[in-house]
Image (cartoon, helix red, strand yellow):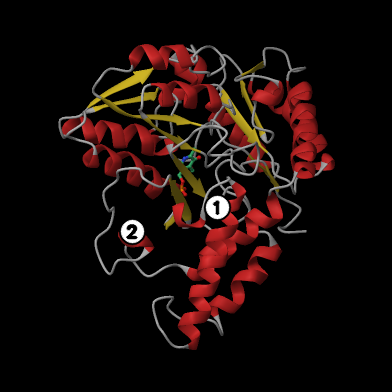
């Protein structure tokens, strides 16, 4: 049991509870093993060993080399790092970036920021289930294109893009491919060589690890500028004293979480949730079904209703849900992802996202399914 069971937590796309095994792995690095990984004494060496062990764990999990993993303060920083540092490093080659309309805000806003610096960005449409067509990517590539950035598993509607097909197109045209894998990491297959990806954003707090830690995979040989200047940490690309407890926790949650059994468990509960909610009159599913959907994601729309209101009633019953991404909430705008898959602004207001985790139980899903029809009837 990892959190108070009177709460049914179904907002695991926003963040997850820390796995107790992760807490245990981190604790010594707050208490006795508090050295700075740059110090040459024994506490420093101990921290450095933990840092490099963790780097190897993360690298192995995506088929990368340890030297290709650069720790950051999370997914937002890694996405900014990937997009902005690649753009400026390759400025002499071109100034065009391709992305999609269903990216996380930190990708979209990095591209918008670059546009203000003289870069050009193409925001590709997606289909009704949220997929970008690799052929559309190919058509959008120009001699000036330097980077394609496509989210792997969508944080709102769970769509898993065909990275291998996108990777093939990018290789063919010698354009770098970046993917934001914060939601898909440990939930679906990710291999930088099989899928031919050059930069990958990862973070820990979506997989029962600590907040404030992530990583950017950068393929050896990719032309990229240093993101933070300083003492030359992380191969000189991202200076700053490494967050050793966080990084150790990150590696531990990957060790604990990257299991096919967990995926099977989540897939079964996700499908039970989808099947049950769709029995409610008017409810519609956003995003695809089956193995092209993140195993922990269910996203519905109740046309004519307001998702915030449904979430409020669920909260009163101890069930945590969300309407869209935790970050979109700050803009007070209906989800850009739901609008990109063809919902009107009004329809998008009626979105409800329920995201489970490997710790979610069938009993919790049953309770949510029991509560929801009454709530919808009451609001109507
Ligand atoms: C797809 C995606 N990318 C990036 C982020 C940002 O990650 P972080 O919260 O570690 O900055 C998130 C988390 O909200 C996300 O879901």
Horizontal side of residue 94 vs 358, given as left or right: left
Can you give x and y, in whole percent of width and height, for residue 275 in the image? 78, 22
Q: Which residue is mark 1?
A: 59
Disc 2: which residue: 238
* x and y percentages locating residue 363 in the rendered image: 84, 41
Q: State the residue at coordinates (48%, 27%).
A: 167
Return the disc, 1 or 2, that comes first in the chain's sequence. 1
Most foreground residue, 329 or 63: 63
Can residue 334 be seen at all in this image of the molecule?
no
Measuring 42% from the left and 26% from the top, which residue is drawn there?
Answer: 171
Q: Nearer the viewer, residue 269 or 310?
A: 269
Q: What is the distance, in whole Å, between disc 1 and disc 2 at their CAs?
A: 17 Å
Q: Is mark 2 within 8 Å of ligand 1?
A: no
> In the picture, residue 99 is in which quadrant?
top left
Q: Which dot marks residue 77?
A: none
Using the rendered image of the protein, determine whether residue 118 is visible from the camera's viewpoint: yes
């Amino acid at each position: 049991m990892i959190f108070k069971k009177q709460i049914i937590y179904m907002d695991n796309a926003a963040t997850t509870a820390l796995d107790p095994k992760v807490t245990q792995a981190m604790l010594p690095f707050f208490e006795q093993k508090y050295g700075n990984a740059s110090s040459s004494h024994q506490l420093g060496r101990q921290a450095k060993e933990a840092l490099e062990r963790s780097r190897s764990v993360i690298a192995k999990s995506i088929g990368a080399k340890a030297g290709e993993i650069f720790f950051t303060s999370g997914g937002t920083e890694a996405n900014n790092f990937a997009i902005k540092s690649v753009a400026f490093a390759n400025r002499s080659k071109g100034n065009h970036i391709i992305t999609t309309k269903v990216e996380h805000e930190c990708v979209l806003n990095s591209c918008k920021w670059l546009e203000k610096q003289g870069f050009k960005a193409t925001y590709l449409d997606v289909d009704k289930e949220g997929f970008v067509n690799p052929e559309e990517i190919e058509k959008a590539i120009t001699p000036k294109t330097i980077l394609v950035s496509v989210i792997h598993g969508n944080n709102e509607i769970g769509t898993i893009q065909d990275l291998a097909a996108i990777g093939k197109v990018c290789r063919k045209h010698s354009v770098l491919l970046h993917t934001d894998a914060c939601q898909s990491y440990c939930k679906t297959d990710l291999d930088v060589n099989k899928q031919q990806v050059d930069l990958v954003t990862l973070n820990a707090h979506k997989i029962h690890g600590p907040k404030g830690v992530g990583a950017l995979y950068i393929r050896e040989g990719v032309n990229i500028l240093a993101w933070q200047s300083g003492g030359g940490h992380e191969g000189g690309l991202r200076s700053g004293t490494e967050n050793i407890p966080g990084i150790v926790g990150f590696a531990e949650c990957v060790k604990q979480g990257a299991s096919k059994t967990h995926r099977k468990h989540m897939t079964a509960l996700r499908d039970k949730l989808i099947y049950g909610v769709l029995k409610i009159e008017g409810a519609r599913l956003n995003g695809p079904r089956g193995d092209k959907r993140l195993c922990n994601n269910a996203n519905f729309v109740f046309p004519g209703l307001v998702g915030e209101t449904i979430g409020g009633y669920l909260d009163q019953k101890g069930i945590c849900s969300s309407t869209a991404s935790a970050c979109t909430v700050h803009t007070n705008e209906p989800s850009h992802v739901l609008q990109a898959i063809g919902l009107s602004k009004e329809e998008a207001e009626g979105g409800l996202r329920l995201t489970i985790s490997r710790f979610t139980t069938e009993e919790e899903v049953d309770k949510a399914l029991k509560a929801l029809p009454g709530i919808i009837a009451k609001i109507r």
